[in-house]
Image (cartoon, rainbow, N blue to C red):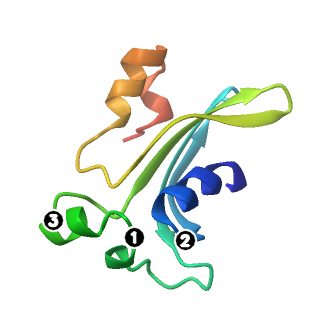
Amino acid sequence: MDVARVPISRDLGTRVIFVVETLRTDGLWTYLQAVPHTPDGAPLNWLQTPMAEDWRAGIMSDVVMVLLRKNGPHWQIIDYVIGPTDVFWYEWIDQFGLPEALFYQP
């Protein structure tokens, strides 16, 4: 979680913690889908972030999606998205040749 928090906090301009919706790994790849909250656990006020205009316009969600890959003993962020309104991870399936089961299990 700490690896994912760094760029998300930077892009949002505030420290965050995650309320995890999905956390799945195959040992080499990990997918995280979560909702950022303030460090005290309160919902994030998106109007106080650089995404305020998109939030007001209703063209974003409150979700972050993060793709990580194991690099030796550490996890490395490969890609992430803040506020997607679609199933962004479909791009990662094609781009990195990943199985859909890493992202979605009915």
On the image, the x and y values in percent for residue 13 come to: 51, 66
Quadrant including the N terminus: bottom right
| Residue 63 versus residue 32 in the image, above or below | below
Residue lying at 38% horizontally and 58% vertically, measured from the top left: 63
On the image, the x and y values in percent for residue 39 come to: 62, 79
| Label 1, residues with CA under 10 Å away: few <14, some 14-19, many ≥20 | some
| Label 2, residues with CA under 10 Å away: few <14, some 14-19, many ≥20 | some
Q: Which element carries disc 1, helix, strand or loop?
A: loop
Q: Which residue is mark 3?
A: 58
Q: Which residue is mark 1?
A: 49
Tell which circle, 3 or 2, labels the residue nearer the N-terminal end. 2
| Label 3, residues with CA under 10 Å away: few <14, some 14-19, many ≥20 | few
Q: Which element carries disc 2, helix, strand or loop?
A: loop
Q: Which residue is mark 2?
A: 14
| Residue 71 versus residue 47 in the image, above or below | above
On the image, the x and y values in percent for residue 93 come to: 40, 22
Amino acid type at circle 3 is Gly
Tell which circle, 2 or 1, labels the residue nearer the N-terminal end. 2
Residue lying at 55% horizontally and 71% vertically, measured from the top left: 14
